[in-house]
């Protein structure tokens, strides 16, 4: 599914990136080819976050190509 | 019941508005701190639904439906974490596609055409197909998620 303005995500940590570099890992290896949207709000008390090994809240892509 | 006592509810949304609904819920949480939502997920495989992880009760989710424009309804009953776990590890787009499989292209200039798979590149998640009805065999390379399997290859 390709929408008009696909957000960039970091290829290494799968987080949505607004600028040119990922704020979490500093990587500039970005892509807009991803699928599945996950927003973690409270990673400490979330099973989903635990399973995905996410320790900071944020928006994450489930699948990055 | 999960480790943290969270339940997972499925929220029915308008088709193709899943991500918008997720963003709207996140915005809503800023104004309504009484909602205790841990995570929200919109897997691509599950069109028209958004999964919400929360320790809150069903009635709370109904309240969200009333506050979010594209949310339609909450599916009755709660889902266990085990049932949604597989969405977190997406399977390869080319899984289940082998050489000889008949597929239908669902995107791009050849949308709607049937084709036979000639080669599968699992690393790039691409497949090379030849159109079924074309006179001369022209190999076309497409993304694995741009096809729908019609018939599996015979053994």
Image (cartoon, rainbow, N blue to C red):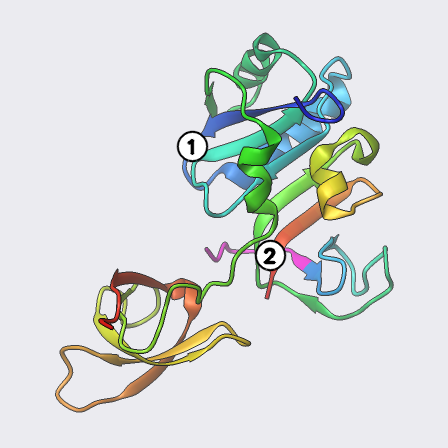
Q: Secondary structure at mark 2?
A: strand
Q: Quadrant of residue A44?
A: top right
Q: Position of residue B69 (x, y in %)?
A: 51, 24
**Residue at horizontal 72%, vertical 20%?**
B5
Q: Secondary structure at mark 1?
A: loop
Q: Which residues are magenta?
A: A1-8
**Residue at horizontal 75%, vertical 55%?**
A18
Q: Position of residue B103 (x, y in %)?
A: 27, 67
Which label sits on residue A48?
none
**Residue at horizontal 41%, vertical 37%?**
B15
**Residue at horizontal 40%, vertical 76%?**
B127
Q: Which residue is mark 1?
A: B14
Outermost residue on the front side: it is B155
Helix, strand or loop: magenta stretch:
loop
Left or right: residue B2 versus residue B143 is right
Left or right: residue B90 versus residue A56 is left
Whether label 2 touches label 1, CB < 8 Å = no
Left or right: residue A21 versus residue B43 is right
Can I make out residue B70 in this image?
no
Same subunit, tags 2 and 1:
no
Q: Give the quarter of the figure containing the N terminus of chain B.
A: top right
Q: Quadrant of residue B94?
A: bottom left
Q: Give the quarter of the figure containing the C terminus of chain B.
A: bottom left
């Amino acid at each position: 599914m390709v929408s008009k303005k696909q957000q960039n995500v970091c290829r290494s940590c799968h987080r949505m990136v607004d600028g040119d570099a990922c704020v979490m890992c500093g990587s500039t290896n970005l892509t807009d080819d991803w699928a599945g949207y996950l927003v973690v709000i409270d990673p400490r008390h979330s099973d989903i976050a635990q399973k995905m090994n996410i320790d900071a809240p944020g928006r994450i892509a489930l699948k990055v190509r | 019941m999960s480790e943290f006592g969270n339940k997972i509810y499925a929220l029915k949304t308008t088709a193709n508005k899943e991500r918008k609904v997720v963003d709207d819920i996140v915005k809503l949480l800023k104004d309504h701190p009484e909602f205790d939502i841990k995570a929200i997920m919109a897997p691509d495989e599950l069109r028209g639904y958004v999964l919400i992880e929360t320790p809150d009760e069903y009635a709370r989710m109904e309240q969200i439906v009333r506050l979010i424009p594209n949310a339609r309804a909450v599916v009755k009953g709660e889902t266990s974490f085990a049932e949604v776990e597989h969405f977190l590890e997406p399977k390869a787009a080319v899984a289940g596609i082998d050489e000889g499989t008949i597929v239908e292209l669902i995107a791009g200039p050849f949308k709607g055409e049937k084709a036979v798979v000639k080669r599968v590149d699992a690393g790039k998640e691409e497949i090379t197909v030849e159109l079924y009805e074309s006179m001369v065999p022209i190999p076309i390379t497409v993304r694995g998620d741009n096809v729908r399997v019609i018939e599996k290859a015979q053994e």
